[in-house]
Image (cartoon, rainbow, N blue to C red):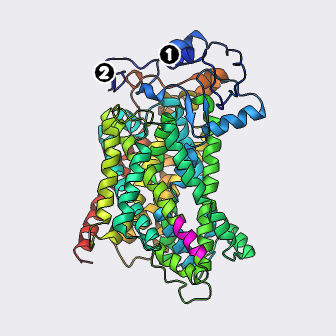
Amino acid sequence: MTTRSDPGQPGRPAPPDGQQVQRGAARRPADGAAGGDGSPAPPRPPVPPPAALSRPTAVLDEAHLGDIEGALGRIRVGDEDRSGLKRRLVTFLAIVGPGLIVMVGDNDAGGVSTYAQAGQNYGYTLLWTLLLLIPVLIVNQEMVVRLGAVTGVGHARLINERFGRFWGWFSVGDLFVLNFLTIVTEFIGVSLALQYFGVSQYISVPITGLVLIAITASGSFRRWEQAMLGFIAVSLILVPLAFLSGPHWGSIFYHLVVPGVQGGVSSTAVLLIIAIVGTTVAPWQLFFQQSNVIDKRITPRFIPYERADTTLGAFVVVGGASAIMVVAVYAVRGTNLAGKFTDALGVANAVATHNHVLAGMFAIVLLDASIIGAAAVTLSTSYAFGDVFGIRHSLHRGFREAKPFYASYAGMIVLAAGIVLIPGAPLGLLTEAVQALAGILLPSASVFLLLLCNDREVLGPWMNPRWLNILSGFIIGVLLVLSGTLVLDTLFSGLNAAQTAIWLAAGLAGSALLLAGWLRLTRSRRPARQPHPRTTMTEAERQSWRMPPLALLKPVEWSTGTKMGVLILRGYLVVSVLLLIIKAVQLGSGGH
């Protein structure tokens, strides 16, 4: 169990959230900040009840307590008046960031490549897959928003504390490997994008790595977020790019709502659909947004604004993915390149046969996506590193205050960039391994996310309602089917992916029905269901509730069904990862 002290200040207890409110309540909002424009300070808000002032919280680093310093505004501690439309808009601008960055960051180099492949090989007919991913993205990321704002503890630390060291290290160890391979693919994207402009990878990759380190190690959360939103603004050139690519609007709207596959459902098409899901919904997103919400100092009262930020990001990422498909369709129109995808650079060259300016814009999109992806995925890993080893891990701290945190970030950037520059490195194999490993880990990450969001000790009145558990369970079932199909096809060539998916879905549905029936028969032996904690609290109490220190929480008590499910999941992960390693070694040595 953990001790309740600031990791950077041994023996010094983390100050209660209420004490931060008391100190900051008398501060005057800064000019240009949320609630401040140079006019006299507003009346001091009422002091919270004594219980709120004295209740300790689980926040591990005091740098995670204080004013919200966003790229587009600041909210002072104690400045809690959110009434009025203008006031709410200013608050939203100050909060916006974590949701938008995590979503757009997933439209990275691998995402651009996957969406472009879908457009080049299947036209507009796979657009419907993107529309279906919007609720998946929102549901998953909304849960980590609540976890971050309510607990003040990162995803990796919560898994380790609530489910034991085995699952903590298993989850984080796999995350480190997967994230590192993903960072390598981001630098592959950088090299491909700048190759279009004739820039050698031995120049483009090192310079990009230095830029990423400089932005992150600035010692200012606000400057880092401003840089990320700047890159996101650059990605908006996808809008004019798509409009100038001769889109067939009738066909686009039709295929957004009507599922279908050009040329019929084939094993190759099914695997591409799975790749679209895998590149759009990734495990690193869960770890990143929870830690970024904590680092931005977002508390429960601002959860509605962060939900809006996340929802906005989900629509932006799907809109960007759709635009990339539209551009890829334009690239091969009137040529014999349809169905012959190579890589994102090949798409840029194909666009150049129509219009060199549009081709340059597409290369810039690829470069920008690679930089955003590399920044977010690497920071996700460094946040998890800080969680696991109990070190300071906040962008509010300068390099001297958090050397191990920034050193882990810089080390991953340097190592990943170095691998891309190795002559003859199996970059194609690495890209394939990333997709397969993400397919294996995503259901596991989603299962633990769901368990945490139903942990009464962790979320209290912010626990999942029953309808959200049902929806999340269905999403996890779909992810398990897609994951199993991708893993089996990766490991055993020659399988029919469509039939494999159908059989896996049928088997999973049958198992779920049997488990539900068995649990129903044993219901009489279980204690009566307790009412949801939010039904016993006022809205003000709910907004001020935060998770107590981890050492004070009651141990997790798993039901028989949960234990069985986790054991099966553990076996699936271990066997799948081992088989994937064997397969990668065979491919790397020239075997089949």
The picture quadrant where one finds residue 365 is bottom right
Mark 1 crowdedness (10 Å alpha carbons): few <14, some 14-19, many ≥20: some
Q: Label 1, on which residue?
A: 55
Residue 454, visible in the rendered structure: no
Residue 1 rendering spot, x and y as whole percentages: 32, 26
Q: Quadrant of residue 79?
A: top right
| Quarter of the image where the C terminus is located | bottom left
Q: For the stretch drawn in magenta, what is the main secondary structure? A: helix
On screen, residue 321 above or below 511: below
| Residue 549 relative to residue 48: left or right | left
Q: Is residue 419 visible?
A: yes
Rendered residue at 51%/12% (across/down): 54
Residue 211 shown left or right of residue 312 in the figure: left
Segment tinted magenta in the rendering: 357-364
Q: Determine whether the residue tagged by mark 1 lies in a helix, strand or loop.
A: loop
Query: Mark 1 or mark 2, which is nearer the start of the sequence?
Result: 2
Query: How many neighbours does mark 2 have within 10 angstroms: few (below 14), some (14-19), or many (20 or more)?
Result: few
Relative vertical location of residue 376 with respect to residue 159 in this rendering, above or below: below
User: What residue is pinned by disc 2?
Assistant: 10
